[in-house]
């Protein structure tokens, strides 16, 4: 159990301390992981940005991930997506694409996304149930040529960690639990992170 996201971030920093000389690019999955990403970037002398990937929720059950869409527009659907009407899934995909575009405009209005090419890149999230969102982020980033690609998570079930190990050069997950029900069960304080906090953290200089 973590006290909050910042405690999880500090524990991830301990596990990734060898990266400090690499000036890593820390890419947080909004919104919950952005405070973690800021803490990690500051501690590891790295840069912070967001990787914009959105879960595609099941029609009628938006919390259940049936896939994900990334900032390039690429869609990765789970086999379970086949259980739903194609037009309903397509509407949800388009809704999430539009939200990604809107978030990039809001979060980094005065600059483009930081190029991960040739960099040591750490993708951070507070946790993942199915791994769909993190998997989509890793796939999108791999296409852009990072030198090393690391997935860092607070909590996930074992099958999700195994899935991500096939996509990243390294997976660091602090709590790997076969009794995983939801990410929030691993945090005493799992308050919502608002857009205003994300914008402030992205705009602040490291230090």
Image: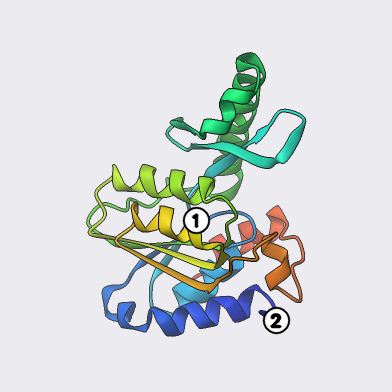
Looking at the image, the residue that sits furthest to the front is 178
User: Which of labels 2 and 1 is toward the front?
Assistant: 1
Q: From what the image shows, is residue 178 above or below residue 92?
A: below
Q: Residue 106 placed where, x, y %?
A: 61, 45
Q: In the depicted view, which residue is nearer to us: 127 or 177?
A: 177
- Name the secondary structure under disc 2: loop
Relative horizontal placement of residue 11, taking residue 183 as reference (left or right): left
Q: Is residue 207 visible?
A: no
Relative horizontal placement of residue 135, taking residue 198 as reference (left or right): left
User: To which residue does mark 2 refer?
Assistant: 3
Q: In the depicted view, which residue is nearer to us: 63 or 82?
A: 82
Which class describes the residues within 10 Å of circle 2: few (<14), some (14-19), or many (20+)? few
Q: Residue at image x 46%, y 60%?
A: 161
Q: From what the image shows, is residue 184 above or below residue 89?
A: below
Q: Residue 102 placed where, x, y %?
A: 61, 36
Q: How is the image coloured?
A: rainbow
Q: Residue at image x 69%, y 60%?
A: 181
- Name the secondary structure under disc 1: helix
Relative horizontal placement of residue 90, taking residue 164 as reference (left or right): right
Q: Residue 149 placed where, x, y %?
A: 32, 59
User: To which residue does mark 1 refer?
Assistant: 160
Q: Residue at image x 47%, y 38%?
A: 71
Q: Is residue 146 visible?
A: yes
Q: Residue at image x 44%, y 48%?
A: 135
> What label does residue 181 carry, if any?
none
Q: In the depicted view, which residue is nearer to us: 26 or 113?
A: 26
N-term mark: 2 or 1? 2
Give the CA distance from mark 2 to mark 1: 23 Å
Which class describes the residues within 10 Å of circle 1: few (<14), some (14-19), or many (20+)? some
Quarter of the picture containing the N terminus is bottom right
* Number of numbered discs overlaid on the protein picture: 2
């Amino acid at each position: 159990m973590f006290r909050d996201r910042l405690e999880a971030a500090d524990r991830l920093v301990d596990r990734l301390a060898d990266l400090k000389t690499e000036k890593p690019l820390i890419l947080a999955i909004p919104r919950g992981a952005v405070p973690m990403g800021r803490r990690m970037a500051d501690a590891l002398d790295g840069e912070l940005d967001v990787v914009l990937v959105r879960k595609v929720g099941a029609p009628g059950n938006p919390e259940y991930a049936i896939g994900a869409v990334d900032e390039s527009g690429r869609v990765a659907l789970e086999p379970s997506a086949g259980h739903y009407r194609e037009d309903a899934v397509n509407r949800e995909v388009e809704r999430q694409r539009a939200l990604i575009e809107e978030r990039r405009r809001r979060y980094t209005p005065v600059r483009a996304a930081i190029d991960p090419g040739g960099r040591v890149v750490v993708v951070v999230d507070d946790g993942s149930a199915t791994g769909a969102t993190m998997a989509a982020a890793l796939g999108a980033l791999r296409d852009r040529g990072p030198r090393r690609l690391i997935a860092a998570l607070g909590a996930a079930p074992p099958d999700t960690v195994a899935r991500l190990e096939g996509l990243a050069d390294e997976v660091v997950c602090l709590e790997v639990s076969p009794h995983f029900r939801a990410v929030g069960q691993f945090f005493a304080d799992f308050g919502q992170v608002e857009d205003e906090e994300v914008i402030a953290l992205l705009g602040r200089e490291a230090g």
